[in-house]
Image (cartoon, grey):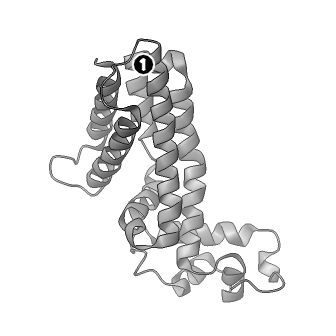
Amino acid sequence: MATAAAPREAADGSARAAILGATERLLQDESLDELSVAQILTAANVSRATFYFYFASKDDAFIALLAGFMDTFVPRFEAIVGDVERRRDPALLREDIAAWLAIEPPHEVIVRSAVEEWPRRAELQAVYLAGQRRLSKALAKAIDQDRKAGVALASIPSAQLAAGWMWTMERSWYEAVGGATHMRDLPAVRDALAATLVAAIYGR
């Protein structure tokens, strides 16, 4: 619960960034279930009052962390599929999608934790699924435009194709990051996902 007045250490907002940074670092070694507010306080070097000025719980802090990641990750994809000339060149689209999937290692933990936790945490689920819907909507729109232009295959309905690929991408990326058998070569998995999407849309 937020306090009525901001603690001194919260005045310039730097404490909020410290809390989020500490949460991300701690999740490298702890699950969200295992992580405690006390650990975050120590790692961020902030008081309990400051933590609760910004966040109602550790889940709330993680949701803010995920939302911040999505604020960059989702628009990058929208820009890729919104660039008509590049997306209609299969080689360029494969390159762009594979690069988009190359999430920087420090941030991989955000996505990994979100994939693990969204099915059982309602507020997190809302944020996560909103991001997935936005990604699917952008892809479906691009597919529809290219089908109308006669350059994309007319097969599976665009909304189903887009959503299906997004969920396939999520699971494949997660298994690769987790070191699943036959998926340990993460760059190869990213390339395969990009190639699969291009083939499904354009047939090449």
Q: Residue at position x 33%, y 31% from top?
A: 197
Q: Nearer the viewer, residue 160 or 34?
A: 160
Judged left or right of residue 115, residue 76 is right
Q: Disc 1 designates what residue? A: 147
**Could you tell me residue 142's position as x and y percent?**
49, 27
Judged left or right of residue 3, residue 73 is left
**Could you tell me residue 74's position as x and y percent?**
54, 44
Q: Nearer the viewer, residue 117 or 151?
A: 151
- Hey, what amino acid is under mark 1? Arg
**Could you tell me residue 174's position as x and y percent?**
32, 54
Judged left or right of residue 57, residue 199 is left
Q: Which of the 4 image quadrants contains residue 185?
A: top left
Q: Is residue 150 above or below residue 61?
A: above
- Total numbered labels placed on residues in the image: 1
Q: Which of the 4 image quadrants contains residue 94?
A: top left
Q: Residue at position x 15%, y 52% from top?
A: 181
The quarter of the image holding the N terminus is: bottom right
Q: Is residue 198 above or below residue 133?
A: above
Q: Is residue 17 visible?
A: yes
Q: Nearer the viewer, residue 97 or 8?
A: 97
Q: Which of the 4 image quadrants contains residue 76?
A: top right
Secondary structure beneath label 1: helix
Q: Is residue 64 above or below residue 88?
A: below
Judged left or right of residue 61, residue 90 is left
Q: Nearer the viewer, residue 48 or 139?
A: 139
The quarter of the image holding the C terminus is: top left
Q: Residue at position x 58%, y 72% from top?
A: 61
Q: Badge 1: few (under 14), some or many (20 or more) residues near its Cα, within 10 Å? A: some
Furthest toward the left, the residue is: 181
**Could you tell me residue 54's position as x and y percent?**
70, 76
Q: Is residue 22 visible?
A: no
